[in-house]
Image (cartoon, rainbow, N blue to C red):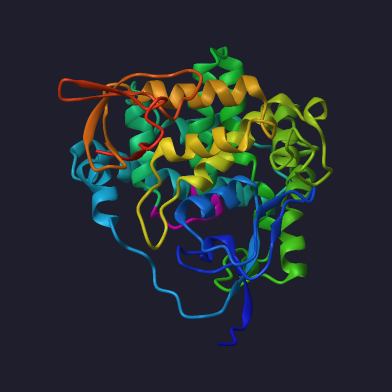
Amino acid sequence: MMMNKAKIQINQAIPGMVVAADVYTKDDHLVIAKETTLTDKIITRLEFYSIPELSVYSIDQKPDVDGFLEQTTYYERIKQSESFKRFHLAYQNTVLQLKSSLDAIVNSQSVINTDELLREATEIIVGYDSNIELFDMLHCMRNYDDTTYVHSLNVAVICNIIGKWLHFNKKDLETITLCGLLHDIGKLMIPTQIITKPSKLTSEEYTTVKTHTTRGYTILKDKTIDPRIKYAALMHHERCDGSGYPYGFYSEQIDSFAKLVSIADVYDAMTCARVYRGPLCPFEVISIFENEGYSKYDPKYIMTFLEGIVQTYINNTVKLSDGNIGEIILINKLELSRPIVRIGDDYINLMKHRDLHIVALA
């Protein structure tokens, strides 16, 4: 049977699609081969490598929704809580405020009011002393419209959490939060019809989207703000192995705060909800980082971040790939995605039980 090929954006990929051409990174590393059938894990792996689009055979595909309700049960419970209802309202208000603030920065030559930006961002952080609660709240917002404003707020909150894990002082914590808020401001200079285009981007359109890094820097470069905020806008798509853009910088050339923002940026993208499932389990994301290696991200930052997430979910119940429900008791620092899980009176060390892995929070 003859099948036509079509290029799609990564956010249009769903399990079951068949890849019509080899997919390579910028530095010619093969990520997936032609004829590969996409799975959820492979799609997330493509996002890990910042693959923007791929070629698939253009046959009708239906979302694989098996297990959707099971995967979202944990988050559905959270959505029913009074705490989440308060967070949801504050989140919506903050997004509206942030939209107004970012639009004003782009459309005028006025001074950036960093105090106002910080106030807007920290409104949804105040009152949540527990990192697990904040991460859970953000996960429950993943089906919110994926606009530049929402993504920027999510990245700012994640950056704030990482900064606390790294024991940043007050000034640096404020700066890294602002880096998250302003890292994608250049996207507001990209035509809306390109940013929100539901169909595949042309090569020219994708090239235009990639200019958001240099456009963001241009917007911020003459502003009286911490230089690290400007560099975060410019370099958050750079990677330590030189595979990023716009300049293909290597580790020593990339600003340290931009390295941190890149982690928060990709984590937010990889954990977003999709049409065929709810938010991806954090342990699946951690597994992808571990399997693909740490060469793209600063080891100090990525290890602190991943270990922080795992520590956050200690004593939480999880579902294993064999259907059993257990409680995370202890992390394995050599393989963070494979902690020790207690099921009844048994203790399962996932480092030794290679046939098992965590598939969902329970």
Q: Is residue 5 above or below residue 153?
A: below
The single residue placed furthest to the bottom in the displayed view is 1
- Callout count: 0
Q: Is residue 249 above or below residue 89?
A: above
Membership of 147 in magenta stretch = yes
Q: Position of residue 159 (x, y in %)?
A: 54, 30
Magenta span of residues: 143-150
Q: Residue 91 or 305: which is nearer the viewer?
A: 305
The single residue placed furthest to the left in the displayed view is 344
Q: Is residue 311 above or below residue 194?
A: above
- The residue drawn where x is 38% and y is 62% is 276
Q: Position of residue 241 (x, y in %)?
A: 76, 35
Q: Position of residue 83 (x, y in %)?
A: 23, 35
Quadrant housing residue 75: top left
Whether residue 98 sits left or right of residue 93 in the image: it is: right
Q: Position of residue 290 (x, y in %)?
A: 55, 32
Q: Residue 242 or 67: which is nearer the viewer?
A: 67
Kindly tell me whether residue 11 is visible in this rendering: yes
The quarter in which the C terminus is drawn is: top left
Quadrant housing residue 239: top right
The quarter in which the N terminus is drawn is: bottom right
Q: Residue 180 or 300: which is nearer the viewer?
A: 300
Q: Main secondary structure of the magenta part?
A: loop
Q: Residue 256 or 353: which is nearer the viewer?
A: 353
- The residue drawn where x is 77% and y is 46% is 245
- The residue drawn where x is 39% and y is 20% is 311
Q: Is residue 152 above or below residue 336?
A: below
- The residue drawn where x is 26% and y is 40% is 84
Membership of 91 in magenta stretch = no
Kindly tell me whether residue 113 is visible in this rendering: no
